[in-house]
Image: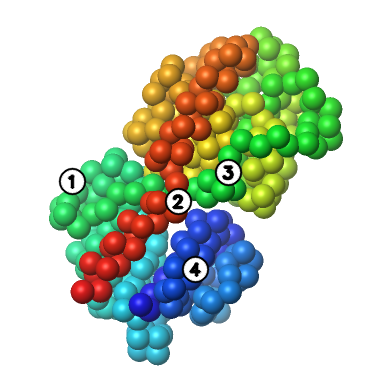
Amino acid sequence: MKILYLSSATDTLGNHNHKFIKALVESGYDVHLVSYHPLPIAKNIQEIKGVKIYHYPPKLIKKPLYFNRIFHFRKIIKKIRPDIIHSGNLFNVSFLAALSGFHPLLVMPFGSDVLILPQKYRIIKLINKFVFSRADWVTCDAEFVKNHIINDYKFDSNKITVFPWGIELDLFHPKNIYHSIREKLKWENNIILIMNRHFESVYDHETLIKAFYISKDKNPKLRLLLVGDGALKEKTKNLILKYGLEKYVYMSGRVSREKMVELLNESDIYISTSISDGTSISLLEAMACNKPVIVSDIPCNREWIINNDNGFLANVGDERMFSDSIIRLSKDILLQKSMGEKNGRIALERADWKINFQKLQNIYNILAK
């Protein structure tokens, strides 16, 4: 079966796309990745043997307004002659796929394109409405996202499949890691919080820094590890300096997935202050490494975390509530262990990428009939 996979496939979403494309190639599909994004294709995707990559960065515009490439994209469709188009983000990538008129079309929202941006910009909601009117099937990673699509866009519930994108449990699991980061930072006897979300407004690093500032005075052993990159990285650095936390916070930058496993296993508590999320892959990876978690009390997180059972939920933007959870969990080693072990079991039962990927294959088989 020949799949035209339409996505930006840059480093920002490289890990998500890498997982899909790699699994498709290894399962015997003839995969053709098409991208019009101005940034380069993620290196880990370029290294996948067997995927055919068509990258056409725009020359005259800086922003990836993909829909203005419609005539070119139709030529690419004729050249590839796919059995299915599988497209990502709604208002630019999937909009281009919808404009092409090709069927069958599988649309895969990423989260904020359904949950946040349509509420801010009416034009995006109108674009999404058009995309869903042309889609033959939709897959999303959370029931909350599914309900939004049904309620806001009147999409047929029988043509939506929910499955968490899942994680590679053969990579993300508890490991006895040589404490390189602890030794490097002289944090051998500290309690390390880790957050590995990109430095973007939706992840609300400001609330995290404020919560950590409050918590540090009540538990001096606390340290914070920030992993990733993004537009607000410098702003976050300035906040760290403003609160005098430079000795207590370390920013590692972007790391490989193998290094991420090490950092998760070397840390004690996973934390995320996101304002909105679908099913967070970062959260699932931490759970698979037997980490207790403190996350925002938002609908998709509630599908995985029960407050005071396998983690703590804190109100969005409430640094005091996040701080209370940090202090309680950081001072209770037994609670950390019991919550972490529960999360490991949940990840094994519900977040196995190899099992969840079969749902995507089932969708392909339905569409290809």
* Residue 273 pos. (x, y %): 51, 31
Q: Please name the amino acid that badge 3 sits on.
A: Phe
Kindly report which numbered mark, 4 or 1, lies closer to the viewer in this rendering: 4
Res 225 seen here: no
Say which residue appears at 53% left-offset and 62% top-offset.
Answer: 18
* Label 2, label 1: how far apart the Cα atoms are: 28 Å
Instruction: Indicate whether 250 appears above or below 308.
Output: below
Q: What is the number of the mark on residue 172?
A: 3
Instruction: Indicate whether 112 appears above or below 249.
Output: below
Secondary structure beneath disc 2?
A: helix
Secondary structure beneath disc 4?
A: helix
Q: Which residue is mark 4?
A: 26
Q: Which residue is mark 2?
A: 353
* Residue 163 pos. (x, y %): 34, 49
Kindly report which numbered mark, 1 or 3, lies closer to the viewer in this rendering: 3
* Label 4, label 3: how far apart the Cα atoms are: 20 Å
Q: Please name the amino acid that badge 2 sits on.
A: Trp
